Amino acid sequence: MSVKIRLTRRGRKSQAIYDVVVADARSPRDGKFIEKIGRYNPNVNPAFIELDEGKAFDWVMKGAQPTDTVRAMLSYRGVMYKKHLQVGVNKGAITQEEADKKFAAWQDEKLAKVEAKKDNLAKDTASKAKARKEAEEKVKEARAESLRKKAEELNASAEEAEAPAAEATEEAAETAEVEAPAAEAPVETPEAAAEETPEASAEEEKKEE
């Protein structure tokens, strides 16, 4: 019987998650399987991989063939490298102790890379959030400046509209001040005229004599 290590789909639409299973190569993708050895969620960054590495290693050593995606996962978790070392031990190329030391060194290096990637992702997320906040602040400032300019334009327009009315009022007041003295000028009466010209009165009296 040919055995494969592959993914079987579950989860809702557009948010699929997968089980890592060992199944007969002749069974359908989501059909019966022999054993479930892990889970895989590609919807997060970095992708979530939960794997029973011991069982996966045993099946690989028994000849189970992983699919391309599962092979990448097994390589990521060191199962394929461990198989490579174990084949060397079985052939007598290296000792088991040397193989264990090499695998431990590989795990430490891999763990450091994973932590560095997580740190970079966290920094990238923080920088993007900061940039988004700065962009929002700039938009708010631009809107406030636009509103301020509109208010200034409205005030200027109102002042320009009020200026002609004020000038007309001032002109009307000046005209009224000029016309008022002419209207209030006293009218001379005959009596007043006689009082103002005593010489003319004296000449008239001589003529009468």
Image (spheres, rainbow, N blue to C red):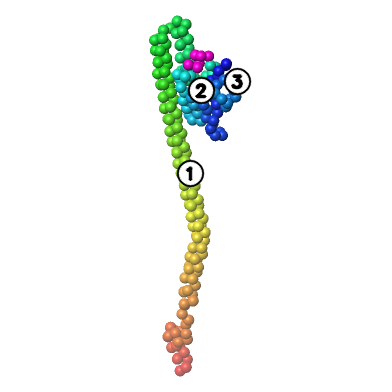
Q: How many circles with numbers are drawn on the protein?
A: 3
The residues tagged by marks 2 and 3 sit, at their Cα atoms, a distance apart of: 15 Å
Q: Is residue 68 visible?
A: no
The residue that label 2 is drawn on is 35
Q: Is residue 103 visible?
A: yes
Q: Earlier in the sequence, mark 2 or mark 3?
A: 3
The amino acid beneath tag 3 is Arg
- Quadrant including the N terminus: top right
Q: Which mark is residue 8?
A: none
Residue drawn at the location 54% of the way across and 30% of the way down: 10
The residue that label 1 is drawn on is 142
**In terms of secondary structure, what is the magenta stretch mainly?**
helix
The residue that label 3 is drawn on is 26
The amino acid beneath tag 2 is Glu
Instruction: Point out residue 62 in the picture as x, y percentages from the top left corner.
Output: 51, 14
Residue drawn at the location 43% of the way across and 85% of the way down: 195
Instruction: Point out residue 106 in the picture as x, y percentages from the top left corner.
Output: 42, 16
The vertical placement of 53 against 136, above or below, is above
Instruction: Point out residue 17 in the picture as x, y percentages from the top left corner.
Output: 52, 30
Check disc 1: other Cα within 10 Å, few if <14, some if 14-19, many if 20+: few
The vertical placement of 25 against 205, above or below, is above
- Labels 1, 3: front one: 3
Check disc 3: other Cα within 10 Å, few if <14, some if 14-19, many if 20+: few
The amino acid beneath tag 1 is Ala
